[in-house]
Amino acid sequence: MIRLRAAVEADLHSLFDLDQICFADGIAYSLSEFYSLLRSKGTIGVVAEEDDVLAGFAMAQFGRLRRTYGGHVITIDVAPEFRRRGVGRRLMEHLEGQVRDAGASWLRLEVAVNNSAALSFYVGLGFEAIGQIRGYYHRSLDAIVMEKVLATDGELIR
């Protein structure tokens, strides 16, 4: 059974190792970047485990854009043996709930234009493409910027 919990500094090396498996050099985060994320008060990190085995994790940060408050998904990583079991969906739903509860009106992320599985996953979660960043990955691969407008107290806030 998958259990979710908050990411803590003691997870540093496990998160780094999984990120190296999930993403190519230049896309995966460095150990020092993970250290900074885990220590930042503006970061939400959630870990998925099954019998103390790391199944995946996700991280988001809070920010402002044009006088609105929102969240930015930094990364979501699911171990290969746990994929297609709902782990990614649970991680994203947890992050979404955390940022919504903190008063955020939107959640954004970037995804490589050639990652059709991830694009489909995010669309299935209610994200919409709102833009594109040229050369975002490796200065040669474009990213699609996706956003989900979050409901607060029964209303959509933009």
Image (cartoon, rainbow, N blue to C red):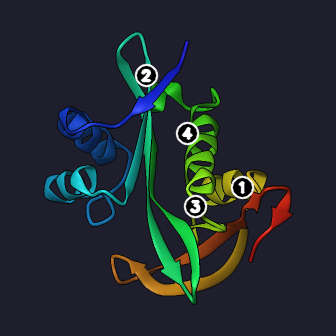
Q: 14 or 63: nearer the eye?
A: 63
Residue 124, compared with residue 106, is above or below; it is: above
Which residue is most to the right? 154
Mark 1 residue type = Ser
Mark 2 residue type = Glu
- Label 2 neighbourhood size at 10 Å, few (<14), some (14-19), many (20+)? some
Question: Residue 31 at what x, y percent from top left?
Answer: 16, 52
Mark 4 residue type = Leu
Residue 24 in the figure: left or right of residue 68? left
Q: Which dot, 2 or 1, sits closer to the camera?
A: 2
Residue identifier under label 4? 91
The mark nearer the N terminus, 3 or 2, is 2
- Please, what secondary structure does the residue beneath circle 4 have? helix
- Please, what secondary structure does the residue beneath circle 3 have? loop
Instruction: Give the Cα distance between marks 3 and 1.
Output: 9 Å
Q: Which dot, 3 or 2, sits closer to the camera?
A: 2
Question: Residue 49 at what x, y percent from top left?
Answer: 43, 22
Res 6 quadrant in image? top left
Residue identifier under label 1? 120
- Label 1 neighbourhood size at 10 Å, few (<14), some (14-19), many (20+)? few
Instruction: Give the Cα distance between marks 3 and 4.
Output: 19 Å
Instruction: Give the Cα distance between marks 2 and 1.
Output: 24 Å
Question: In which quadrant is the N terminus drawn?
Answer: top right
The mark nearer the N terminus, 4 or 1, is 4
Mark 3 residue type = Asn
Residue 22, compared with residue 74, is above or below; it is: above
Residue identifier under label 3? 115
Instruction: Give the Cα distance between marks 4 and 1.
Output: 16 Å
Residue identifier under label 2? 49
Residue 93 in the figure: left or right of residue 149? left
Asked if the residue at tag 4 contacts the one at tag 2, i.e. Cβ–Cβ closer than 8 Å, the answer is: no
